[in-house]
Image (spheres, coloured by chain):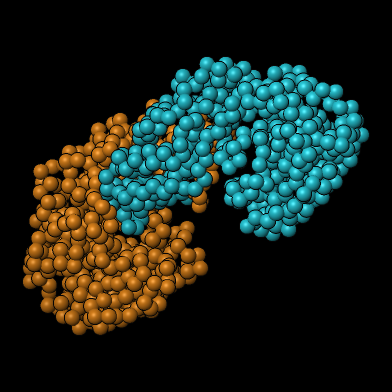
Chain colours: A cyan, B orange
Amino acid sequence: MSERGTALPSAVAAHLEAHRQAHLDDLLELLRIPSISVLAERAGDVRAAAEWVARRLERAGIEHVQVLPTPRHPLVYGDWLHAPGRPTVLIYGHFDTQPVDPEHLWKRPPFEPWIDGDRVYARGASDDKGNMLIPILACEAWLRGEGRLPVNVRFVLEGQEEIGSPHLDAFVEAHRDLLACDLAVSADGGQFAPDVPSLTVGTRGLCALQIDVQGPATDLHSGTYGGTIQNPIHALVALLASMRAADGHVLVEGFYDRVAPLTAEQRRLLHAVPHDDDRFREALGVVALFGEPGYSTLERQGVRPTLEVNGIWGGFQGEGVKTVLPAEAHAKITCRLVPDQDPEEIQALIERHVRRHAPPGVRVQVQKLPGLARPYAMPMDHWANRAAADVLRELYGREPVYQWMGGTVPLYEVFSSQLGAYTLTFAFGSPDEQVHAPNEFFRLSSFERGKMAWARLLARLAAVKAAD
Amino acid sequence: MSERGTALPSAVAAHLEAHRQAHLDDLLELLRIPSISVLAERAGDVRAAAEWVARRLERAGIEHVQVLPTPRHPLVYGDWLHAPGRPTVLIYGHFDTQPVDPEHLWKRPPFEPWIDGDRVYARGASDDKGNMLIPILACEAWLRGEGRLPVNVRFVLEGQEEIGSPHLDAFVEAHRDLLACDLAVSADGGQFAPDVPSLTVGTRGLCALQIDVQGPATDLHSGTYGGTIQNPIHALVALLASMRAADGHVLVEGFYDRVAPLTAEQRRLLHAVPHDDDRFREALGVVALFGEPGYSTLERQGVRPTLEVNGIWGGFQGEGVKTVLPAEAHAKITCRLVPDQDPEEIQALIERHVRRHAPPGVRVQVQKLPGLARPYAMPMDHWANRAAADVLRELYGREPVYQWMGGTVPLYEVFSSQLGAYTLTFAFGSPDEQVHAPNEFFRLSSFERGKMAWARLLARLAAVKAAD
């Protein structure tokens, strides 16, 4: 059987078919480990999950499996590198989970997985234990069925994605040789909808700032002093209002200077996404959608930059009335950035804007907050996208749509800058799966389709790269 | 001796002089009662203070003394009405105190008064036990020295001023006959400075609102959704910014329509106040004073209205970064009002402004908060002001200055609307006396001067009113 098609060798397909129940049992076992990475008292459980994953990789036939320490939770490495001349693929996923609160909203205990129809419920079912297990099982099917993999693979599976992967950057930088690859494939994420496959080709970058406005030395009585001095809240709202036009256009000087214009191809691809403004609006519960004139919702979400106030506070927030003229007021801002904006430059532009527009009578300071991320864009016609599109087209019976995620995945930028590799996201979650919320679930049908898709993808990547 | 001068009958002056130590002992005794009205566990102490005050009024020769209940703390009434044809004066003060926290900043326990030089330290020393005791002692000196008072008096001394006098309004309305008077005199307050006498002739009114902006049904991820919907914080800051020009002028349509223009006389009197902008600015710790162009600091503070945001909140207020697009944002506003603004009309104007300027994509609601107060103005040439000016001029050796307080004293409006009487504030606190703060004190010299001043005022009020 040619690796140029997406059909599987029958032994691989047979292995997957024969082990459906065993694979589900594996998933349930992993879901029972309460590996909540943010809770110090769960560190032992995160480690237990790492050990479980390491043993499972070994059982699958992956070699050189190691549980590697970081300053906090460990990560798991393993490889299979016996396909000379074939591309090397770095497979990423994570075995830690979000916390479970509010726990009382769960129908059953979040780490006692239960199955209802096509759904397996548990914290971490979709994000990311179910999705992370899939490539391990797909590799196992190849190795047990055919005795080989169509490509070289390295696994890097981590235990602290849900706390922002604080040590991944340093780990990758310190282990460039160990992680050397032609392509990264992330098993963390999902498809546009259960029946709509998708390829993620861009994520927005990020920069964050805090604005601190200091007025009088202490809170003052708004009667005795009102009218004599600048109110820090008024100063702050004037400053924030100066950053954005009423129509949503950002007014920070230079903000759009490096923004790559939307191409006709991007417009066409975004237009092809089965997105419905009315349904989107209803799902969010807003009276109307809103944003920069001249751009569609998906364009504003994916390929246009934003400046959003994430938090604001100052003065009295309790019940009733307190006649205070507050000493200070604060706001937090993040910007989502698109190619070719630079997060440090945008921080500097905002700082300059604040300096130029600071109202009189108060001291205004800008704190540059950590967490910079560059925008990321993968060429739409990259060989990995073409390979993935072939697989998805066959399994879903329709063309995948192209997604520019509004969010930021620092991982992509880490793999890009440290390893020189693009990241294909190949995962099978759906947006409705209550990720980060009570009663998270994963579809059993997605679990099955995912295994088939990954098994095919490994072969297809080799084939398309060879023809590239 | 004529009651047209401000000199005292010698028997009255002699009584005051002979009882200096006894009066100080009285004050120390009252200061030892921890009558903190806001603390439920101190209700017994507030009642003990009421009983102490009632006994002291009786000892002074005041008649019909009663401790009268309200839904919370009691108040004390007493009268002496044997001066037919003379004006009746309602004397107001309060025997409750503020809490003492932060208690560790007190040099000694706050209800164990101690004397250091010219100062007696204790919670309530200046606000208002020292000032409240003065008219009782002055009446006693007249009654013991001369067997009579130059005017009819009624005392109404309350035990819940520090919690906003929640039942005073209803009490006055229900006891209009009992409290009938030609003039109220408040013994709660102070003079401009220890060496600068003053007459308070105006206070600003008040109205309060809350603005609630609702965006999406829940907090959203600012990456995934940023750019697609209106951010409630941006909507709120745009709305608040629309209410005020950069120079501090209020832009709510109609806000200034009923504001009485500043008269040349007001300007002259305010200019005569020994106010120093530099010292004022330094004391507040601001980089510059600020407010409506064309008006001095004291004009902006006393006779011009304000619109101040007292509190604002929405989204994330913690350490670091949280990439949230918040579901809601809120702000609290109070306006200080001057004649002839109406608090309900101003609320309605702001509500209309909010309706007209509400940004798209969010639901905006206005809550009208309780605590309306009309602005209050006492004619500068009112007979009580003239009488008080005569007394102050003689005791301080200089003309009193006229003060328009920026704050709101609901009492004035209650006495004005319910009893048809203006309120003269005649008290001897100074702005430096740490009222509401640790180590509150009252000057012994102010206590002595206050007794002399009140004893003279009672006579002078009769004389000036007779000639009116």
Residue at position x 18%, y 56% in the image: B278
- Observer able to see residue A124: no
Q: What x and y, as percent, mark residue B236?
A: 43, 36
Q: Residue B82 or B291: which is nearer the viewer?
A: B291
Residue A21's quadrant in the figure?
top right
Left or right: where does residue B155 sit relative to residue A105?
left
Residue B293's quadrant in the figure?
top left
- Is residue A269 shown above or below A328? above
Q: What x and y, as percent, mark residue A426?
A: 70, 32
Q: What x and y, as percent, mark residue A70?
A: 65, 55
- Is residue A256 shown above or below B468? above
- Observer able to see residue B166: yes
Residue at position x 31%, y 50% in the image: A363
Q: Report the number of discs.
A: 0
Q: Residue A339 or B279: which is nearer the viewer?
A: A339
Q: What x and y, as percent, mark residue B406?
A: 26, 51
Left or right: where does residue A324 sit relative to residue A335?
left
Residue at position x 42%, y 25% in the image: A247
Residue at position x 12%, y 77% in the image: B10
